[in-house]
Amino acid sequence: MSDTFSTINFNKSPDGLVPAIIQDSNTSKVLMLGYMSDEALEKTKELGTVTFFSRSKQRLWTKGETSGNFLFVNEITADCDGDTILIKATPAGPTCHTGADTCFGEKNSQDTRIGEASFLNYLQKEVIRERKLNPQDESYTSSLFRKGINKIAQKVGEEAVEVVIESKDDDADLFKNEVSDLLFHLLVLLEQKNIDLDEVIGVLRSRHQ
């Protein structure tokens, strides 16, 4: 995720809110418009998922927090006056609460979406990162972060071996479970290294252009 501005002037509006336009990074379709406070913008940058200030609920609201249709941030910029935000994002599903692709009734090409793979972004940025920033005693993920990079890397290696072993058998369910364990621990390792999955996807994209 990249930022191409330094300051937003939230004081221009009496309520301290500025409009935020959300655009699909892949199709350039405008998906929706919401409003952000200073805190909402910081939360968006921290989590990597679009977070607004809901004027009706009078609180921060992460798009997709109930539907799962998150907007994964790729770039944040502002207009020349510093009072409107433009966010280029990857939608995890329909953006509008009606089920439409956009809040303007436009069709957004489905074949440019990441689809189910976007859940991995959610898993890293919303779940794993939360366990790292706010550790919980009973959380397995938090315990991995407490043990440090060596233990996390070791778990990735162990799970990779399990994948190899299960690949030689014919039990598809066991194989899928082992691959899932490997992906999860790899996301934990990425988070420990402060590397977003998006950055790895960027490397893959650059190899296939």
Image (cartoon, rainbow, N blue to C red):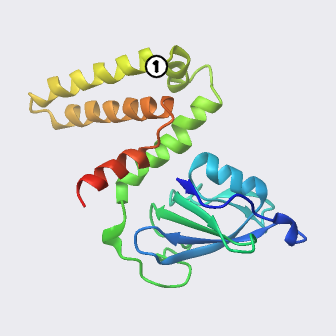
Residue that mark 1 sits on:
149
Question: In the picture provided, is 125 more to the left or to the right than 84?
Answer: left
Task: Classify residue 153 by image quadrant.
Answer: top left
Residue 203, percent from left and from top: 33, 48
Q: Residue furthest bottom?
A: 105
Question: Of helix, strand and loop, which one carries label 1?
Answer: helix
Q: What x and y, as percent, mark residue 202?
A: 37, 52
Total marks drawn? 1
Compared to 191, does 77 lie above or below? below
Residue depicted at 63% across the width and 26% down the height: 135
- Nearer the observer, 83 or 36: 83
Locate residue 21, reporting x and y percent. 62, 73
- Left or right position of 95 against 159: right
Label 1 neighbour load within 10 Å: few <14, some 14-19, many 20+? some
Residue at 78% of width from left, 63% of height from top? 57
Looking at this view, name the residue that lies furthest to the right.
14
Q: Please, is residue 138 above or below residue 200 in the view?
A: above
**At 51% from the left edge and 14% from the top edge, which residue is drawn?**
147
Q: Is residue 74 above or below residue 125?
A: below
Quadrant (top left, top right, bottom left, bottom right) of the C terminus: bottom left
Could you say where residue 3 lies in the image, as x and y percent from the top left? 60, 57
What's the amino acid at mark 1? Answer: Ile
